[in-house]
Amino acid sequence: MRNAFLLIFILNWCVNSAQAAYGSSADTLTKVADTIGSGNDSQMRSYDLMRPSHYFSFLANNFKHQATAPFNLRPKEWTYLGAFAIVTGATMFVDQPLNDEAFSFTEKHNGFRKVSDKISSAGGVYQAITLGVLGSTGIMLKNEKLVNTTLLASQAFVTSSVWGHLFKKISGRERPSRYIGQGKASPAFRGPFSDLGRDRYGEKLTSSFPSGHTIVAFSAATVYAMEYSDKPLIPVISYAAAGIMGASRIISNQHWFSDVLVGATLGHVYGRQVVRNYRRRTTASDTEHEQKLSVTLGYNSGMILPALTYRLNGR
């Protein structure tokens, strides 16, 4: 949760810097109907996320969509959800043996584990800083698309971080790193607000399910992959980096395989929601303010006369 607050602080600085670099937009915000039945509080055009008021308004709108999404699933989406639940349940049966294999491998290859530990510890705060650096780079280079994409990625990062934290509080799953003497930790779910023990260094453990590092990594990666889908290398790099982060959490004995699987899926879903919501709203705005000049025929005093008609949609 504190990672989300850190990112808000970093991106708030970036948003204000971007506003100063590019200037404020003169577009008037227009209310339109929302796809979930309630009214949008604002309607944005491209790059308006650089305005702090628009940024936080859109952030609240994304939370609203994500919170109500389970009540608006279509039959096909319920089918996908059911299939995913079955796959997740099946992977939970192999969590323990997969963890044993990963632990055995790293015991034999200590150097590999050290690298994995460094990657694993680079999650959370460092992921937020990475987004801040990318946003700042876009500002310095006056690359509007990079700035806007980073702001969208930060929205996915913040929302997925908050939901992931909530799911952890509810699930109460033991981590594989829990220290119980000579025995093995269990991938059991203890329920909301349970005491999940401590690791071998005495640090208090939080719930393992789902993997928070993986959620935020895949949510941000999905935004970059979707916004730069015309550049094949960007999606590959984005998802590869997120995948390495998820794998490192297993190798470092911090998560079970199913934790990472669910985290990656949730992150992808949140990232897609943020991008699709933004595209829907900006497209509606662009259409609303589209200007058209056309030739028409009119009838006046028994004569048919040509006329020019100028129309500004939505006005």
Image (cartoon, grey):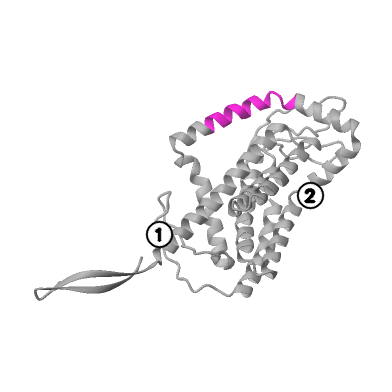
Residue at the image point whose x is 68% and y is 46% from the top: 236
**In this orientation, does residue 76 appear?**
yes
Q: Earlier in the sequence, mark 1 or mark 2?
A: 1
Question: In which quadrant of the rendered view does residue 107 lie?
Answer: top right
Q: Position of residue 44 (x, y in %)?
A: 49, 63
Q: Is residue 80 left or right of residue 249?
A: left
Question: In which quadrant of the rendered view does residue 109 lie?
Answer: top right
Kindly identify which residue carries mark 2: 122
Which amino acid lies under the numbered mark 1 shown in the image of this protein?
Val
Is 87 in the magenta?
A: yes
Kindly identify which residue carries mark 1: 32
Question: In which quadrant of the rendered view does residue 13 lie?
Answer: bottom right
**In this orientation, does residue 201 appear?**
no
| Residue 251 drawn above or below residue 62 | above
Residue at the image point whose x is 59% and y is 54% from the top: 227
Q: Secondary structure at mark 1?
A: loop
Residue at the image point whose x is 55% and y is 52% from the top: 274
| Residue 43 drawn above or below residue 176 | below
- Count residues near mark 2 (Cα–Cα under 10 Å), then give few for <14, some for 14-19, many for 20+: few
Q: Secondary structure at mark 2?
A: loop
Q: Are marks 1 and 2 in contact (CB under 8 Å)?
A: no
Q: Is residue 96 left or right of residue 12?
A: right
In the image, 44 versus 195, the foreground residue is 44
User: Which quarter of the rendering shows the C terminus?
Assistant: bottom left
In the image, 57 versus 218, the foreground residue is 218
Range drawn in magenta: 81-96
Q: Position of residue 59 (x, y in %)?
A: 56, 57
**Secondary structure mostly taken by the magenta-highlighted segment of the chain:** helix
- Count residues near mark 1 (Cα–Cα under 10 Å), then give few for <14, some for 14-19, many for 20+: some
Q: Position of residue 121 (x, y in %)?
A: 80, 47
Spatial CA span between label 1 and label 2: 41 Å
Which amino acid lies under the numbered mark 2 shown in the image of this protein?
Ala
